[in-house]
Image (cartoon, helix red, strand yellow):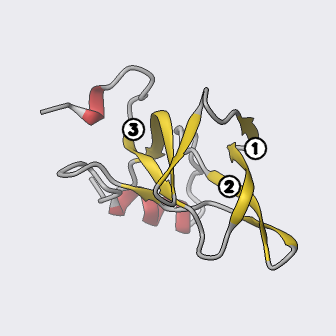
Amino acid sequence: MTDYMNMPGVPKGSYAAGERVKIPAGAEPPYTVYINGVEQTEGEDFNVEDRELVFTRPIVKEKMGTSRWLAMYLGLFGTYRKDEKVDVQFQRGGKTELVADLPVIPYEGGEGGSAG
């Protein structure tokens, strides 16, 4: 079994959430994909398979425990951990649309965004 918490490029306080994101319903190519605002290249950074974007590396999310969330909510401190956002621009009904912060499909038996 792969240890998704300790994969290369996953800093302490974050976890490898997964490598797949569902393409929004009705979205038509071409897809322009961004991770944290940086454009990704199809064939190099991701591929399109069965209405999903499949990345060549894990998408890293911040591990957010209850106490950390509460401290941030109360304004005691912010967050400086790695937390990648996947945004996709596409065509739908002849119009260009952008959907921000698409949910990552978690690894089977993986962290899946649970608090810790």
- Residue found at x 59% / y 31%: 45
Depth check, front residue: 5 or 64: 5
Disc ID at residue 87 = 2
Quadrant of the rendering where the N terminus is positioned: top left
Q: The residue under label 2 is which amino acid type?
A: Asp
Q: The residue under label 1 is which amino acid type?
A: Gly
Q: Are marks 1 and 2 in contact (CB under 8 Å)?
A: yes
- The first of marks 1 and 2 along the sequence is 1
State the image coordinates of residue 112 (x, y, percent, origin top left): 31, 56
- The first of marks 1 and 3 along the sequence is 3
Q: CA distance from mark 1 to mark 3?
A: 22 Å
Q: Which residue is mark 3?
A: 13
For mark 3, does the 10 Å Cα neighbourhood hold few (<14), some (14 to 19), or many (20 or more) residues?
Answer: some
Q: CA distance from mark 1 to mark 2?
A: 8 Å
Nearer to us of marks 3 and 2 is: 2
In what element is the residue under mark 2? strand
